[in-house]
Amino acid sequence: MKENTKFDRPSDIVTLTADIVAAYISNNSVPVAGLPGLIHSVRRTVSGLTLGGVPDAVVMDADVQRPSPAQIRKSVQQEGIVSFIDGKTYKTLKRHLTANGLSPQGYRERYGLPADYPMVAPSYAEWRSALAKSFGLGQPSVMAGRGRKARKAA
């Protein structure tokens, strides 16, 4: 028995879109700024499916709403970086981005972030820096200086 999946009224598409978005939001964390983009993407996909065509849902980058400069500034907090993908706070974004199929550069491009946008929380970077300095890293060693002078003299 074949089901008829074509919707005759626009209200059917709206209802289906609302149901899908509600189900998605109940299981996933979505930032408030990302809701209009999510609704638009789902509606476009549902409309494409109901008209018998294949939706261009693969092109997700065009549907991503880019954050405002204020949102970008607020996303960098002392204790963590707020992800524009799911709205959660992370000390480091690298593993989170890899799990979502993005590189740091791809993430910056996708959301229109500046090239110097941090991938690590400031407090975590400071802690790592202090730890490295306590081991003597990042400081010229006495042996390295002697080796250079010896090479120049030879």
Image: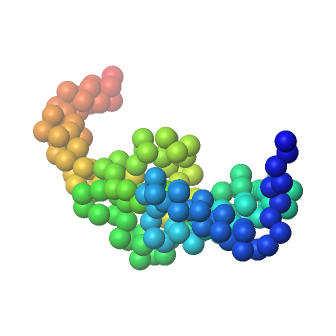
- Name the residue rendered at 85%, 45% in the picture: 2
Q: Where residue 66 sits: x, y (%)?
A: 55, 69
Left or right: 137, with 151 as reference point: left
Q: Where residue 8 sits: x, y (%)?
A: 83, 69
Quadrant of the rendered image containing residue 57: bottom right
- Name the residue rendered at 34%, 51% in the picture: 90
Depth check: give the residue in front, 6 or 40. Answer: 6
Residue occupying the far left of the picture: 134
Q: Where residue 94 sits: x, y (%)?
A: 43, 44
- Name the residue rendered at 15%, 34% in the picture: 135
Depth check: give the residue in front, 53 or 70. Answer: 53
Q: Where residue 56 sits: x, y (%)?
A: 77, 56
- Name the residue rendered at 24%, 30% in the picture: 144
For the question of whether residue 148 can be seen, the reply is yes
Depth check: give the residue in front, 101 or 138. Answer: 101
Quadrant of the rendered image containing residue 17: bottom right
Residue occupying the far top of the picture: 154
Tell me which colouring the rendered structure shows.
rainbow
Left or right: 83, with 132 as reference point: right
Quadrant of the rendered image containing residue 86: bottom left
Name above or below for residue 49 compared with residue 94: below
Give the mark count. Answer: 0
- The quadrant of the picture occupied by the N terminus is top right
Depth check: give the residue in front, 134 or 74. Answer: 74
For the question of whether residue 112 can be seen, the reply is no
Left or right: 94, with 20 as reference point: left
- The quadrant of the picture occupied by the C terminus is top left
